[in-house]
């Protein structure tokens, strides 16, 4: 029997870091994502193959299902993490992988791994579907994080996400199309480690309640305004608030101080994608700076 699963990638438009403390966050599922295909075999092993967006194998492993141990792998660190996820899923559902069969598993990304669009969260959500377990709990028990990326994996519209009394809540948004033509995503040519960024954030002495309140206010205004000037002011306000909390300069201050429009970090600061307002002429500015991956909002989102 063949089973197929798919999860959307993600971008966190507002609420980075503060979403962990209950702030309302605006997040968008992307056109890019990851699939997982499972074929039953007679091997009593999991034969795992991961493909990138160019159909090139970037990871392979074989696991013995009776002992839940690695037989072989192309990367021991990745293999250890994957095995931990599978074992955790089995703890959550004792029937998972216990039917006496073997499995040939193929994953396929539709975006470059270093883009930071959710290679881990899409994997977690796909495995959770396969194992029939709660993906938010599986994420919590493995990688950690707020869970907004799991919500994006499951939704096909922009969402308003928050953690309320420990529970993730995602509401789909009908985001105004008025501003979309002025929004661009620029890749900073390096991937940021979200877990390291979260660890640093949690070590800072911050009035988290006040930060959450302020970021929630900004989010609420950003998802409702139809004024580009207002939207840009809110982007800058958000950047300055997080900059003060992290004691870290904004990305515009560090790299793009002469850019005439607004720029905002997305997700973990210092890598992955940023959001910029502008027009087609603005693209040339970033290309001259050495940033060639520039994706309009309409081409990034579902």
Image: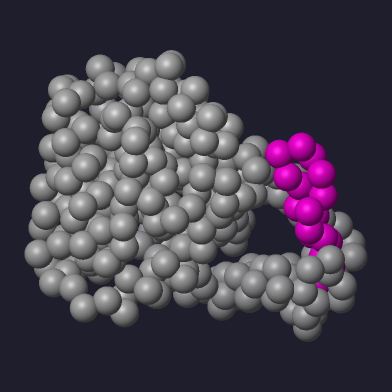
* Residue 178, visible in the rendered structure: yes
Query: Compared to 183, does 146 lie above or below?
Result: below
Q: Residue furthest right?
A: 43
| Residue 293, picture quadrant | top right
Residue 202 in percent (x, y) is at: 31, 75
Query: Compared to 89, does 157 lie above or below?
Result: above
Which quadrant: the C terminus?
A: top left
Display coloring: one colour
Q: Is residue 192 left or right of residue 105?
A: left
Q: Is residue 105 left or right of residue 118?
A: right
Q: Is residue 15 left or right of residue 212?
A: right
Q: Is residue 173 left or right of residue 119?
A: left
Q: Residue furthest bottom?
A: 67
- In this picture, which residue range is highlighted in magenta? 47-63
Residue 43 in percent (x, y) is at: 90, 65
| Residue 157, picture quadrant | top left
The residue located at (39%, 69%) in the rendering is: 198
- Figure disc tally: 0
| Closest to the observer, 267 or 1 | 267
**What secondary structure predominates along the stretch shown in magenta?**
strand
The residue located at (76%, 47%) in the rendering is: 51
| Closest to the observer, 63 or 10 | 10
| Closest to the observer, 133 or 106 | 106
The residue located at (35%, 62%) in the rendering is: 146
Residue 175 in percent (x, y) is at: 26, 28
Q: Is residue 136 magenta?
A: no
* Residue 155, visible in the rendered structure: no
Q: Is residue 58 magenta?
A: yes
The residue located at (84%, 66%) in the rendering is: 74
Residue 236 in percent (x, y) is at: 21, 42
């Amino acid at each position: 029997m063949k089973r197929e699963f798919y999860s959307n990638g993600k971008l966190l438009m507002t609420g980075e870091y503060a979403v962990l403390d209950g702030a309302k966050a605006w997040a968008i599922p992307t056109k890019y994502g990851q699939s997982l295909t499972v074929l039953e075999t007679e091997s009593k092993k999991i034969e795992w193959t991961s493909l990138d967006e160019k159909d090139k194998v970037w990871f392979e492993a074989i696991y013995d299902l009776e002992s839940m141990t690695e037989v072989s792998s192309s990367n021991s660190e990745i293999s250890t993490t994957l095995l931990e996820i599978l074992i955790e899923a089995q703890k959550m559902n004792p029937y998972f992988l216990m039917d006496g069969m073997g499995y040939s598993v193929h994953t396929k990304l539709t975006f470059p791994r270093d883009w930071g669009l959710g290679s881990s969260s899409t994997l977690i959500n796909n495995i959770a579907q396969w194992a029939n377990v709660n993906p938010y709990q599986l994420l919590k028990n493995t990688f950690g994080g707020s869970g907004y990326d799991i919500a994006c994996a499951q939704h096909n519209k922009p969402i308003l996400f928050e953690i309320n009394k420990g529970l993730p809540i995602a509401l789909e948004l009908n985001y105004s199309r008025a501003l979309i033509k002025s929004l661009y995503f620029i890749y900073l040519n390096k991937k940021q480690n979200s877990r390291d960024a979260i660890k640093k954030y949690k070590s800072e002495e911050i009035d988290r309640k006040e930060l959450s309140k302020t970021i929630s206010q900004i989010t609420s205004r950003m998802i409702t305004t139809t004024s580009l000037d207002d939207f840009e002011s809110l982007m800058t306000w958000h950047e300055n608030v997080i900059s003060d909390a992290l004691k870290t300069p904004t990305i515009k201050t560090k790299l793009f101080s002469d850019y005439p429009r607004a720029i905002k970090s997305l997700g973990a600061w210092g890598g992955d994608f940023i959001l910029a307002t502008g027009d087609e002429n603005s693209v040339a500015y970033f290309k001259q700076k050495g940033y060639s991956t520039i994706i309009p909002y309409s081409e990034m989102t579902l």
